Image (tube, rainbow, N blue to C red):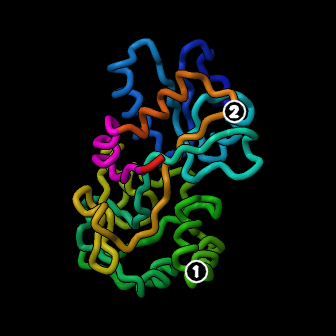
Amino acid sequence: MAALAAAMPSRAETIRAAGTGVGIAIVRQLAEQYRRDHPDTPIWVPESVGTGGAVKGLAAGKLDVGILARPLKSGEVEGGASVPICRTPLVFYINAGRRDVTLSRRDLPALFANALPPFPGGEVRVLLRPSTDTGFIRLLETYPDLVPAVTAARDARGAVMALTDQDAMEMVEASRTLLTFGAFAPLLAEKRKLIAVPLDGVAPSRETLESGHPFPEIPLVLALPPSATAQARAFVDYARSPAASALLRANGCIPVSGP
């Protein structure tokens, strides 16, 4: 947060939006599209500070919009508001050159034990994320029987771990063997050389997102402080508008409908 504060522009008319790496690229694209019609409203979106960093920034009055991978919890930002804009699958993903890799639900314990037999293109190893990572929390909620395997993997000597979504994508992109679990949307929004691994014969794509898939999902949420500016509210409203829906779908995030 100290680094964020040092880089932060003065409030003036600038909308300061920061948060989870799941949504950074999408919000930057929304900001670019929004500014075509609102050139006098600059929007500043720094590198990821995580959902926790967004909550702290909102509570301290340092942010106009928080980018979260979940709604605000009770008591986090008194009087704040959570506005879900879309939802994206959480997928296993790997270097785009490894199209030989497929998984089934039965493979997952062996995956986290690094005990899967090699695929035609070679072995795969799992890249872990911290226990506070939203994607891994949802993974274990969906498959609670994986808790012992994931816990043992984190405790294992020599375990490989990435702290942020961007760190994870960069590490997997640079490897022919690493595979991890995370949000689908940033793979598309950041144009990464990564692919979602089919699970039980299904791999998410722009075309199949809304027709059903076996993966858990997380919301992309824009949060406002209690004293939100009119400019910040207008940008969040835009992110929920029909004008933004095509951009969200193109980036693997299904727009939220309704009030």
Which disc, if any, is residue 248? none
Specify whether residue 166 is in view: no
Q: Amino acid at mark 2?
A: Pro
Q: Residue at x 29, y 52 (%)?
A: 193
Residue 212 screen position, x and y as percent: 32, 69
**Circle 1 residue:** 144
Left or right side of 205 for 65: right
- Quick check: 236 above or below 43? below
**Circle 2 residue:** 226
In the image shown, does 61 or 47 lie closer to the viewer? 61
Residue 204 screen position, x and y as percent: 30, 64
Q: Which residues are magenta?
A: 242-257
Left or right side of 131 for 184: left
In the image shown, does 250 or 9 lie closer to the viewer? 250
Cβ–Cβ below 8 Å for labels 2 and 1? no
Q: Residue at x 30, y 76 (%)?
A: 102
- Quick check: 240 above or below 258? above
| Element marked by disc 2 | loop
Dot 2 or dot 1, earlier in sequence:
1
Q: Residue at x 68, y 39 (%)?
A: 80
Q: Amino acid at mark 1?
A: Pro
